[in-house]
Image (tube, grey):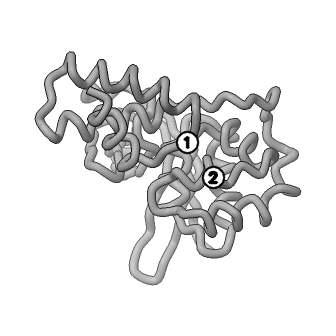
Amino acid sequence: MGIVITYIHGQLINFNSDERTDSVEILTSSGVGYQVFIPKNFSIPTEKNSPITLYTSMQVREDSQTLYGFLSREDRDFFNLLITVSGIGPKIGMAIVSRFTTKEVCNLIMREDFKMLATVSGLGSKGAQKIILELKNKIDGFNMGETSDVIDNKGIINELKQALKALGFDHNHIEECAKEAEKQLKEKPYNLEELIKLVLSSK
């Protein structure tokens, strides 16, 4: 199969972000630089020359070789498991782990909560149900902790803030909308478009 890159340590030389993806460029001690795609809203230093270590998943296609990076081996291994589901490629996989943590996705799978899982942009109900069907008996090896009915909604709240900022809202208005969104998400799941309409209509 050739060389498979599973771990990278070096200095961050560039951080890139757009609506769908974040990526970092890492310069290793050997002088080789790598571009690695990471989940949105990752808690990593973004200052140039900061030390950075990532566990990586290398996905090889006919026309590309792409690295996806994670802060822990468990998160990397879960991503690799996630994209074994038929119809779930790396892009959707990254959208899922950007929206939820590994623990949260595992809890959703065990509860068969496809509606909450389907709030991931681009996944949909059928994709969420397929993930639950194919992975429910394969996630025992992951540290899920206690199953909770309360899902951490930081991912979609951050997406909401970014969307409102792009629409030209000021900081105070954005924070007010974020607080309202947190209340609404405790009642039921919403995708980003629904959440934006909901919080704006409440003001």
How many marks do you count on the picture?
2
Q: Secondary structure at mark 2?
A: helix
Q: Position of residue 142 (x, y in %)?
A: 79, 41
Q: Nearer the viewer, residue 103 or 173?
A: 173
Q: Residue furthest left?
A: 168
Residue density around tag 1, few if under 14, some if 14–19, many if 20 or more, within 10 Å: some
Relative vertical location of residue 198 with respect to residue 113 in this rendering, above or below: above
User: Which residue in the protein does label 1 denote?
Assistant: 189
Identify the mark nearer the N-term, 1 or 2. 2
Q: Secondary structure at mark 1?
A: loop
Q: Nearer the viewer, residue 38 or 57?
A: 38
Q: Is residue 95 left or right of residue 6?
A: left
User: Which residue in the protein does label 2 denote?
Assistant: 115
Please identify the quadrant where the C terminus is shown.
top left
Q: Is residue 76 left or right of residue 171?
A: right
Discs 1, 2 touching: Cβ within 8 Å? yes
Q: Residue at x 44, y 63 (%)?
A: 66
Q: Which picture quadrant has residue 46?
A: top left
Q: Residue flagged by tag 1: what amino acid is it?
A: Pro
